[in-house]
Amino acid sequence: MARLLRTGFMAVAVLMIGSVASAQLINELLYDSVGTDEGTFTEIIGEPGTDLDGWSLVGINGNGGLEYRTVPLTGVIGATGYFVVAQDSLVPNADLIDPGVDWQNGADQVVLRQGTIDIDSVCYGFSPDLICQGDPAEDVPGGTSLARCPDGSNTGNNADDFVGDITPTPGEENDADCGGPGEPEDVTLCMLRENDADGVPVLNGTRVRVMGAQA
């Protein structure tokens, strides 16, 4: 039996989850896009053939801890073991489209619920009003998903299980490097100072290693 713990307290509230909790999990979610409200999704990983009729995804507001949205699920987890609930048709491998999965930015929480039983959840960003699995995952910037790493892992602690992934993979296995930044790009000081026509650094957002001759 898993537990959901309210973070930030020594005396914690405990919510017990049913024995079916190990089978289906929230595996990845993109709750904020860059500059738009398009292309967000929540991916469930689970046993192929699982009928999700009667299941739902529920948004919990980090300000007060109240439910603010419920997205009913319908359909079956396919042979890949992934089920993608997409905000719109821009998301590849979508199994169900519902604009409700454009969840609020953190601190907030998304719960996977079967009937009235909370099966799994992920908190992102700290709030004393949320009942989380262990410590919350980080509140990631727009365009970055929260992904279980390794794919489908579940230690019962959101902070350990989820990482920010700059290359979201709806309907596919989460990146083997767990969303890491990869090798830095070697640049010179001149390249580092270069701006585009709008005055924005060309290398903005790029992980770099500055190369130059020693004085």
Image (tube, rainbow, N blue to C red):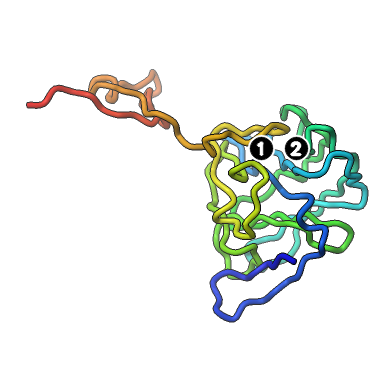
The answer to which quarter of the image holds residue 34 is top right
Q: Position of residue 189 (x, y in %)?
A: 23, 24
The residue type indicated by label 2 comes to Gln
Is residue 199 at least partly visible in the picture? Answer: no
Q: CA distance from mark 1 to mark 2?
A: 9 Å
Quarter the N terminus occupies: bottom right
In the rendered image, the vertical position of residue 126 relative to residue 42, given as above or below: below
Q: Viewer-proximal residue, 166 or 45?
A: 45
- Are circles 1 and 2 on residues that touch, CB within 8 Å? yes
Q: Earlier in the sequence, mark 1 or mark 2?
A: 1
In the rendered image, the vertical position of residue 26 relative to residue 131, given as above or below: above
The answer to which quarter of the image holds residue 178 is top right
Disc 1 designates what residue?
37
Q: Is residue 123 left or right of residue 209?
A: right
Disc 2 designates what residue?
87
Q: Position of residue 151 (x, y in %)?
A: 64, 41
Q: Is residue 169 left or right of residue 202?
A: right
Q: Position of residue 175 (x, y in %)?
A: 58, 34
Q: Viewer-proximal residue, 14 or 189?
A: 14
The residue type indicated by label 1 comes to Asp
Taking the spot 67% from the left edge, 57% from the top edge, the residue there is: 109
